[in-house]
């Protein structure tokens, strides 16, 4: 199975540098100079990284096969992919395909919904959950909220703050009731 390491963005400069939307938690290893990566669509690659830099938290690379701005512009939207080696995964790391379809439960075991996807974001990923009423809720994928992922039991335990999921009842106090 192929996993996306990064998605190529806009060209930067005249020498063929491109901005990357990084999708790996190990860019130093996956995007090292000299690394050759497959592409999706496949006819745009493979590509070999000849230069890499970071500027204000954004990764930029240059490829041997696209050494000018015109070539680099043709790469916009192309995915850099690798063949997955699921044996090398970290203990508390999951692939998006493993999470999709898991039942979402609160700590008491009540159903909150089903995982329908994972959205990578700059600060942390968001677990996309379809609630029983069809509403889509995005849950920050952090240990404090997503307390357990159990692939064997096909579930995710979410200790959600009040109001994150739609059926949460609002507590109306006597003070706010008259407003």
Image (tube, rainbow, N blue to C red):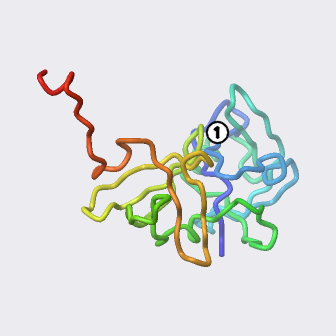
- x, y percentage for residue 104? 45, 64
Image: 131 above or below 83: above
Q: Mark 1 points at which residue?
A: 19
Residue name at image x 67 percent, y 34 percent:
58
Which sits in the foreground, 53 or 48?
53
Judge by depth and name the residue closer to the eye, 43 or 31.
Answer: 31
Occupied quadrant, residue 129: bottom left
Residue 82 sits in which quadrant? bottom right
Residue drawn at (72%, 50%) of the image: 25
Residue 137, horizontal then vertical, whole percent: 37, 51
Above or below for 22 versus 37: above
Residue at figure coordinates x 71%, y 38% from the top left: 60
Label 1 SS = strand
Residue 168 picture location, percent across and down = 31, 48
Q: Is residue 161 visible?
A: yes
Please name whichever residue, 72 or 144, is drawn nearer the observer in this view of the structure.
144
> 171 or 161, which lies in front?
171
Quarter placement of the N terminus: bottom right
Q: Badge 1, how many Cα within 10 Å: few under 14, some, many 20+?
A: many
Image point (19%, 26%), residue name = 174
Is residue 158 rendered to the left or right of residue 29?
A: left
């Amino acid at each position: 199975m192929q996993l996306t390491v990064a998605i190529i963005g806009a060209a930067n400069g005249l020498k063929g540098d491109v901005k990357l939307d990084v999708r790996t938690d190990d860019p130093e290893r996956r995007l090292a100079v000299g690394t050759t990566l497959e592409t999706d669509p496949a006819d745009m690659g493979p590509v070999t990284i000849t230069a890499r830099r970071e500027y204000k938290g954004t990764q930029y690379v240059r490829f041997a096969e696209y050494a000018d701005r015109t070539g680099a512009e043709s790469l916009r939207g192309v995915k850099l992919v690798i063949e997955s080696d699921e044996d090398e995964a970290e203990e508390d790391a999951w692939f998006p395909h493993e999470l999709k379809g898991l039942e979402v439960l609160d700590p008491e075991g009540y159903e909150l919904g089903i995982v329908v996807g994972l959205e990578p974001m700059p600060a942390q990923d968001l677990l996309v959950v379809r609630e029983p009423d069809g509403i889509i809720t995005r849950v920050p994928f952090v240990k404090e909220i997503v307390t357990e992922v159990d692939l064997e039991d096909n579930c995710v335990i979410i200790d959600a703050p009040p109001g994150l999921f739609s059926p949460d009842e609002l507590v109306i106090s006597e003070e706010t009731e008259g407003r």
